[in-house]
Image (cartoon, rainbow, N blue to C red):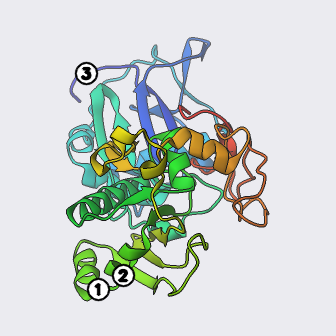
Amino acid sequence: VSGHWNAGCVQTKLKNYVLEYQEGYYHSKNECMFCDHLQGPFVTKTNLLQLDESLPDEVVFEDWFLHVVQDGALIMACPDAMYFSRQYHSYSKRSDKTVWIPLAKKWELNRVLLPQGVKHSFSCQDISFNCANFKKSRLLPVCCQELYEEAVSFFQKFADARNISFELDSGSVLGGVKFNGLIPWDIDGDFFVFSKDIPIFNKKETIEYFKKRGYNLIKYESPKPNRKLYDSFNGYVNIVFGGFNIEVYETGWPSMSNSVYLPQELRNHDTFTKANVGGNWIDTKFSPGLYARNRYGREILKHSQSWRKVGLQHSYADYDPGSFEPCENPMHHACLQSFPGDGNIP
């Protein structure tokens, strides 16, 4: 023993791939604090004490307390039952994120937040998560959103270096308007480029350039010859990475929206409208909010899942926003139905 005492009452918040610990209590009864996690010795019923011994010693009780809370059992700390304590694993849990990785894999965590500002972050690779496997009734993991942000930034730099004009389109524009990035339950990204620029994505050197940086170019379709001026798009390429993808379409218009609708003095590529996507400024429609309003109709700031998920015939259908479909596992920390159907702060 070391003679160091504390009440040992900790609250946990498990939401949207983030596990946060906070010392303290909100409620008490009979001189005992209601807690989510205990730092010191405790007494429990034998039938509750079922430990996952495949986990490292450092986090085996973190896992157990998460299950106890999820099952609805009450946990209390009674500070008058004073004890001496020594947290043998406290230093490693704060300084070494690798001890958390088995728990992060089990619970699908991208962040663990500890008291005093300690933060551990886990990539999709760290927790062996493939973004293609996420459930459509859940929020997309934080690490998948980060992969998208990196891909969009990469594409912007690639396009700038080769004088390729492009714009975010459809749901990617709406994501920029509502979330400064990807809609957290989106299924892909959407870009438009000119017909003349589509063939560059079928060149061997471009394919190799993307592949070396973790991006695969697949399902290439070349623009059809002798097409009418405003025919719908037909040139296409799909950028695949980490189980997620960005669809790049040929625009059926002779100009990007920025070249047509911006004031004359702003119709240069350097002054095209850009949207903040995860801290990166990315070319988008000339007026993202107006485009999104015209594209998706009423109440666009409220939320709806993909037209495929809610049973609509196509993406131009009339959405009924403001709520989410039920989850196959309502207890999962990223279940969409546990989030409000409005606002971007939650």
The kind of residue tagged 2 is: Pro
State which mark lies toward you, 3 or 1.
1
Which numbered marker is on residue 28? none
The kind of residue tagged 3 is: His
Residue holding disc 2: 199
Residue holding disc 1: 203
- Name the residue rendered at 26%, 38% in the picture: 90
Quadrant where the N terminus lies? Answer: top left
- Name the residue rendered at 56%, 72% in the picture: 229
Q: Is residue 200 above or below residue 225?
A: above
- Name the residue rendered at 28%, 26% in the picture: 116
State which mark lies toward you, 2 or 3.
2
* Marks 3 and 1, the one that precedes in the sequence: 3
Residue 123 placement, left or right of 305: left
* Marks 2 and 3, the one that precedes in the sequence: 3
Foreground residue among 52 and 270:
270
x and y, in percent, of residue 314 in the image:
73, 65
CA gap between label 1 and label 2 equals 7 Å
CA gap between label 2 and label 3 equals 68 Å
Element at label 1: loop
Residue 228 placement, left or right of 5: right
Residue 303 visible to an observer of this rendering = yes
Residue holding disc 3: 4
x and y, in percent, of residue 345 in the image:
53, 31
